[in-house]
Image (spheres, grey):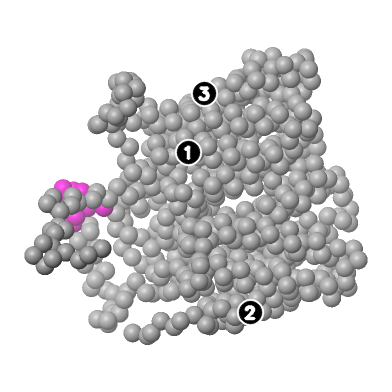
Amino acid sequence: MAPFPSNQTPNMTSANPPQPFEDVDGKHDTSYIDMPLTPKATSVNPADARLASLSRFAVQSVHLRECFAEFLGTFVMILFGMGVNNQVTNSQDANGTWLSINMCWGIGVLIGVYCTEGISGAHLNTAVTLAHCVYGRLPWWKAPGYMISQLLGAFCGAFVIYVMQYQNLNVIDPHRETTQSSFSTYPSDNISNFTAFYTEVVGTGMLLLGIYAITDQRNRPAGPVGAPFAFCLLIMALGMCIGMNTGYAINPARDFGPRLFTSIAGWGSKVFTLRDHYFWIPIVGPLIGGVIGAGLYVVLVEIHHPQHKQQTSDSNLLYRLYDFIMVKYATDNVTSTPTQDNSDVDKVENGYANMPNTPKATDVMPILAEKRTGMYRFAVQSVHLRECFAEFLGTFVMIVFGMGVNNQVVNSEDKNGTWLSINMCWGVAVLIGVYCSEGISGANLNTAVTLAHCVYGRLPWWKAPGYMVSQVLGAFCGAFTIWVMQWQNLNKIDPNRETTQSSFATYPSEGISNYTAFYTEFIGTAMLVLSIYAITDQKNRPAGKYGNAFAFALMIMALGMAFGMNTGYAVNPARDFGPRLFTLCAGWGSKVFTSHHYYFWIPIVSDLLGGVAGAGLYRLLVEIHHPQTPLP
């Protein structure tokens, strides 16, 4: 392209100066992620004549539009969910398996989120709506409209699938005696209502905790593109790890709407009276569990984020006076050199990805946030303690999913999952654990990762004990949580606690020597840490801040598929030692340490050595050869 003559250089400056951009971040109080404000109606009619002719029916009420969206999203979700339930049951597993149910429910949520998230926030779940109200993310006056819309959507979705499956139902259950469980949830035969209630509380708690982590803009959010896929994987994994006991309702609207439909569609009043009037448990359990799960994330992570001053109206003299006093006080009482960058208080040098600096929680505390939750006054000041909280929570969540799928597959004798379910669910477990902690601690979640980071200068050595203790405690508590959920199943299949310890800690397969087991764990952990260094290498081809968690999930899935046969792929000393210590206390006895010639030390030592070797291999062959950025 030829250059312009000097006397004909075009004026590249726009005649109209750019308009100021209105920052609407955080104004939408209902959505999983911060969405722009939704105007009441379009100011410009669409060019298409047909759409223009329909625009006159556009409703003016924002809340009514939100209710429409919640109805549609729940309706679509139930169509997929009830559809796969009926297809697997009515075909007697010829047209699907338990894994089909898990995957289809996840995709149903994915499509439901796409239908609604930009309008209503895509709750699709009464427990989500209640938790958002409790923690100030949704005004209480909107809750009835949301909940009724969700219930109606579930009812209508069940009706549509009932008509589709009517002839099949007449063949396999003409008197409507057994197929009600294809629409609403019921506990397994050997599960008491107490265990069912506990299962629903824990399952919904993990759901809400996952939602809050995935959408936390100050941690490591999944982003506007990744969030629906993260929700999809979260629902899949919940079915894989806690679905055995109750069918994982984890949503009062999803259960009560179809249950109400079946009561008038031929199944009668037994849908409410079965199992000592079980129907209330999938309502009350998820409502309580959702508040607990969201609260756990808020208490351990969210309230400790450094606070930024909230935007307030200039006309509000009270807020202006408050801001002036607090800013002046902070300025007068913080000593720093003129060249010091006050934001660089403590750099997260240990993370999977290079993270921004994490300042201490000593910034000005916004009065609006304090009024909103009432818990910000408990924010800890120590950056390292915040990191330990994040490591504990991330490891706890990872172990709940991982131990859950292990126990579900073993205790159901492969009826409610397979080896593939274990691989997939462990991958998603790491995904959610990363969302819980990456923006704060770097999401190590693994003692071998922590050691490798210390060896290669990515984490100060003095932080290692806190990280490692937090990881072991998180794994111990996660194993306890699943043990309570699976207690009745364990009593049935292994009353003397002779064989099921492998659902918690890892042991070598029959015919595998400790030497081969050591080698397997060494190679597996080396591949794990090498992959982490590759995925997060900013001078190579990093997965990016929104892609990291998905890359880690796929990597963990592949490790199980490739290296899990010999040892059960611990590849993480904390993941193995914490649950092993718990089983020692919970009835399995000292054999968890003495069996297989004192095997217990192998998933500790080999993993620590393998992590250092894998990270070193990547650094030796790739990282140290990057062109060096000149120092300023």
Magenta span has 32? no
Residue 15 against residue 542 in the figure, above or below = above
For the record, the magenta segment spans: 311-321
Quadrant that contains the C terminus? bottom left
- Amino acid type at circle 1 is Tyr
- The residue pinned by badge 3 equals 152
Asked whether 342 or 619 is in front, the reply is: 619
Mark yes or no: residue 87 visible.
yes
For the point 58% across and 68% down, which residue is it?
532
- The residue pinned by badge 1 equals 114
- Furthest-left residue in view? 7
- The residue pinned by badge 2 equals 617
Q: Is residue 511 left or right of residue 574?
A: right
x, y percentage for residue 33? 42, 47
Mark yes or no: residue 269 visible.
no
SS at mark 3 in the image: helix
Give the CA distance from mark 1 to mark 3.
Answer: 19 Å
Q: Nearer the viewer, mark 2 or mark 3?
A: 2
- Furthest-front residue in view? 2
Give the CA distance from mark 2 to mark 3.
Answer: 57 Å
